[in-house]
Amino acid sequence: MELRAALEEQKDRLGHCVHCGFCLPVCPTYIQLGDEADSPRGRLHLMRAVVEGRLEPESDAYQLHLDRCLGCRACETVCPSGVEYGFLLERARALAVEARRPPLPVRLLPALMARGGARSVALAMGRVMRGTGIPETMAGRLPTTGVWGRLGLAMGMLASSRPSRLDAGPAAPAKATTEPRSDPPSRGRVAMLTGCVQSGLFAHVNRATRTVLEVNGWEVVEVPGQGCCGALHAHSGRLDQARDLARVNVSAFSAAGVDHVISNAAGCGALLRESGELLEDEAAEAMAKGVRDISELLAGEDREPVRGAPLPLKVAYDPPCHLHHAQRVTTSPIRLLESIPELELVPIPGAEECCGGAGIYGITHQELGGRVGRRKTDAILTTGCDVVATGNPGCQMQIGAGLLAAGESIRVVHPVELLAESYRRAGWG
Amino acid sequence: MSTTLPLVPSLPLILRGKLADVVGDDHLITDPDRLLVYESDGLTQYRFSPSAVILPGSVAELQEAIRILHLEGRAFVARGAGTGLSGGALATEGAVVIGTARLNRILEVDPANRVARVEPGVVNTDLTRATRPHGLIYAPDPSSQSACTLGGNVAENSGGPHCLKYGVTSRYVQALTVILPDGSRVRLEGAGRGWRGPDWVGLFVGSEGCFGVVTEIEVGLIPEPEGVRTLLGIFDSLEGAGRAVTAIISSGLLPAALEIVDQETIRAVEASVFAAGYPTDAGAALVVELDGVEEGLDAELELAASCVREEGASEVRIAQSDAERTALWAGRKRAFGAMGRIAPDLLVQDATVPRSQLPTVLRRIGEIGDRYGLTIANVFHAGDGNLHPNLLFDRSDAEELARVEAASREIMEVCIEVGGTITGEHGVGIDKRGYMARVLSPEVLQAMSEVRSALDPSRLCNPGKVLPDELPARSELPNEPLPAPDSGPIEVESDRHASELLAAASREGVSVAIGRGRSSGAPPGPHLRLSARGLRGVIDHSPPDLTVTVGAGTPIGELQEALRASRQWFPLDPPGGDDTTLGQVLAEGLGGPLCTGYGRLRDHLLGATLVTGEGRILELGGRVVKNVAGFDLLRLTVGSRGALGLITRLTLRLFPLPAVDRTLVWALDDPAEAARIGMRLAATGSPIAALEWIAGPGSGPCVGESASDDAVPAGALVAARLHGNRPSVEAMVRTLEAAAGIASPRGLEGEESVEWWERRARREGTGAVSVAISSLASSSESVAEATRGWVDLGGRASLHLVGGGVRLDLDPEGESAADRARAILDEVVRAGGVTPAPAPELSGVLGVFDPAGILPGRWRESWS
Ligand SMILES: Cc1cc2nc3c(=O)[nH]c(=O)nc-3n(C[C@H](O)[C@H](O)[C@H](O)COP(=O)(O)OP(=O)(O)OC[C@H]3O[C@@H](n4cnc5c(N)ncnc54)[C@H](O)[C@@H]3O)c2cc1C
Ligand code: SF4
Ligand code: SF4
């Protein structure tokens, strides 16, 4: 079995786990279930048991507990031994899906995403549906369990993807605090990963990204040959598909001759950054080095974005796991939001915990995903914020659906949408 | 060392059904594959798969499950986060694991009384996270604190880097609710909660899950220190770092933490992704952390830095910000994880030696490593003498594994040889059972085993842990004739003498009273009365270790006198003052105002010799600061008032004499107003050594002038005692004066301050009616109100404003005064708000020490 060999090759990486248990209290599934088999240490122990030949990959235990992992990688951040959990999980899942064919909905979405045509049709249908306003109405009203619950969640997610009007203070263009130079000196050339969900349902986020990049002096280069990043495939153990998709992007972006490849979706960004490890080739490695999250490019340690007009909103920032834990981009989004005049940033208790979005987790693990999500919604509601900001489409939809289900009208936006709005009010873009 | 138990007896279907009925199918795990993840804890050398895991969601479920397991005769073991490093939570004998992860609620945080009540599954740091908004923290901070649970901490009596100054878990646990191995439930309370009797809480803390499952824990909190200073000293050699530790301790500083990492560790950390920027050619690095009143810290830091420089540090780094502080600590805190990156396997040892022996022991560990050709990296709590040698190896190399095991054994032998112990904080568990007979006498092992049997006759609760399977034979009891009973008190001359007398009394069934005080009561019928008064004087004082061993008959004053030359002392001011003997303080569980700043005697009791009712001589504890080898019978002696036997000797941990001893006294006309002011002072969170409210004769406002001491003031005093260096004491004075809102309190310093408190202590406990009543600090005002009548009768009253607790003395004149006094006492108890729990049904444990039933534990009617 080839995949088993692949996991066995990771013996060293597994060996780094000293069994200290530091990762238990940060794992959302362990927090909810209290079973160590649903903790990072437990999952690693199961992987190791497979490698040691004490456990079969098709066993219920291996299947169930690896499947239940959100892939949020909170465990990596706290691990004193530097265990590369996310990397191991992808390999372990590959072994799991090979041993047992996963159920239809789990197979469906990655399959859809891998096919450009089918994907566009589905996303367009989603937009039409969203436009009717029906999803929003349904989201708060459907029962929360069973098929109806799944539908309600899907509707809530769809509703949450629509562009938000940001009602705060005078909407009329005000004077900016700092005039941007009328013709900003070019800082460099960047390419944007437009993404599939992002371009299909969150075109407004992509537009905002482009605006803020340009206001800050970055030239945005079109890269038509790009496609789906393959994150969904990698996370669900379809490494071969993921590699195929990644190769397409590596060659497209490498050919673009840009300083940086920019992502505004944490999950996609994380995959791009890790494409070197995924493909094990130099071109991928080189491309990966240039990848930045939009917040890093604008508000990394050594820089600040151009200041726009005041946006007097109370904003709660929720870090997407794939930005915070996987890419370790923790302060830039906060610095970006802090640069907006009069915007008040409020902390969410336990912000670094997963919202339960994790791809289609809410659909496949309705009950557990719901519990993880409710914990996030409850935490957000303690802040009294007007708006939640988070830099990943999945999180935007998941949190939005949670708030809708709780009957709340708090909107969930991408941080760049707030920055773009601040620029719009200043009369630029 | 590597043990695998492949065949686990599976759970019978009926039992499975019963457990599922209690906890629900979702919280019962029986699939052997899923159970694999429970086969190890933080120590991966051992693998024992449980037959099932249950995850109860409530205490009621947990209790019912234990009742069922007990009835079915099925072994069980509690498991917190499984971070233990001695295999304590492993399921030997096909035990059922009871996971506490779902019992993780913080039930109450009570800032006014500085206590919190939690379920056992609460993670250590989550508690402090919840209390910090109130300016309070939970002090014990094991390095695993972000993951380990309070239930686990209680079971292991965990320590941490900061326990050098703040003490280990045992000091902070005030009450416990435990489901005993038979499924019954007991509530155990400590001295602060109204209980007077053997320290059951002390016995249960550190019992490694063998005495039942803890379901509720009440812990004390401390004000978060105002300021912190952190210093890193880089040394060419380990010896230099060790000498710097000794120099710092001898300088009179009491740092919050003193931690050393050696060269191997530095290299491991620097080679890993966690490089902390320590120079890799350094022989050792020493982290010194000081905390306390902001104003006093720079002087302390300077002193510490000069000690470090004088002992030859090649470099001294001082943290200027939180980020820098984290960076200085990084090399220490990351050590464990970093080692996981440089070697496939790691064995963390844990042993404590007297601090003065550190250089010798470290040298010998180095030699052992060389001899066996092994890499041994040392990371340790230097201030406590608590060593953690890490042996790096590769398990797949059987020959290397054998060398590791041999080296590990030799290291233990070295530690034992120099007067150390086999575990300072990780516990015995499964791992160190084999060493138990090396450090504990057959008598002590047998007593531990019998205590365990008394609490768990069927041995179902965490079997196969702590005690070795075979116990060595005890020596014969003496067989001397019994002296004539009722012939007056007999002053015991030696352990042997006490043993002869008690063995004879047990044989003949003659009752024995211990001590001369009234607290032992009047035994029924003919009896012997034994006293330890004759066992007087300092037996051994080791200034560099800050430890002393004294005879139980030594008066406090005599001890302080003997320590003065080395500028050390033991902070203790119980009723009766310096004339009270240490044995009496221990046996009666006495305390005084200084408990506020220093804790009780029990918190610094390192060892004691107990001659049991049966006549067995038990050497309990030792002379090291951290010791978790076996059950804490030592703590059980505290407050036992002769119920276990006669205590002949105690070993205590000492303190440096404070540079400045200052007392502030406010005199107020209204006792209730005085209490309110006192509570405001307490609320400042200043590290006050003592804070008392005092009323009645002898507490006159003209303090310090003995002629007026007997004046009867109308109101009450509030007295605060402050210890520290001059800048910190002065800063505290300013803080307290501002909080009091009343100008110019009377200030006393140095000898005057010492004497004022001594006079106060001597007056206590002298009345014909003399009682101590527990009360909540938050009820101080109502308690003060309730004692008005007492003072009118001519009585004296005092009250600890921080921990609570009232002391009342009176010589009532006539029947009506006595009646009135009784009524007032009832009122004070009500006002105090502490309802003492009834004595727990644990008399079987006392029977271990007194099988013939000759001691007050058996004939006493009540403990109060
Ligand atoms: C990296 C690392 C660093 C560490 N640093 C320290 C340190 O600085 N100081 C220190 O003292 N220890 C340290 N430890 C050891 C360990 O973390 C402590 O012993 C801790 O208290 C164990 O807590 P736990 O919740 O993991 O308990 P577990 O490991 O789950 O259990 C430990 C014992 O407690 C018993 N137990 C658990 N819950 C209960 C309950 N509710 N009632 C009765 N018994 C119960 C179990 O049966 C078992 O015997 C460290 C461990 C690691 C891995
Ligand atoms: S924190 Fe890291 S080393 Fe510790 S148990 Fe988790 S994965 Fe293993
Ligand atoms: S990735 Fe998230 S859900 Fe999965 S084990 Fe790690 S912390 Fe738990």
Image (cartoon, coloured by chain):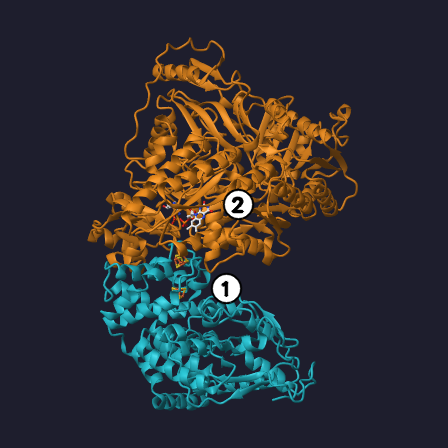
Chain colours: A cyan, B orange
Circle 1 packing at 10 Å, graded few (<14), some (14-19), many (20+), is: few
Quarter of the picture containing the N terminus of chain B is top left
- Labels 1, 2: one chain: no
Which residue is found at the position 49% from the left and 21% from the top? B521
Q: Is residue B670 visible in this depiction of the protein?
A: yes
Give the residue type at disc 2.
Answer: Glu
Rendering quarter of residue B717: top right
Label 2 sits on a secondary structure element that is: strand
Give me the chain letter of mark 1: A
Q: Is residue B471 above or below residue B328?
A: above
Residue ranking furthest to the right = B744
The numbered disc on residue A350 is 1
Where is ligand 2, by quadrant? bottom left
**Residue identifier under label 2:** B259
Query: Which circle, 1 or 2, is nearer the viewer?
Result: 2
Question: How far across and down, in percent of the image, does residue B852 sit?
Answer: 35, 21
Question: How far across and down, in percent of the image, does residue A288 sit?
Answer: 45, 76
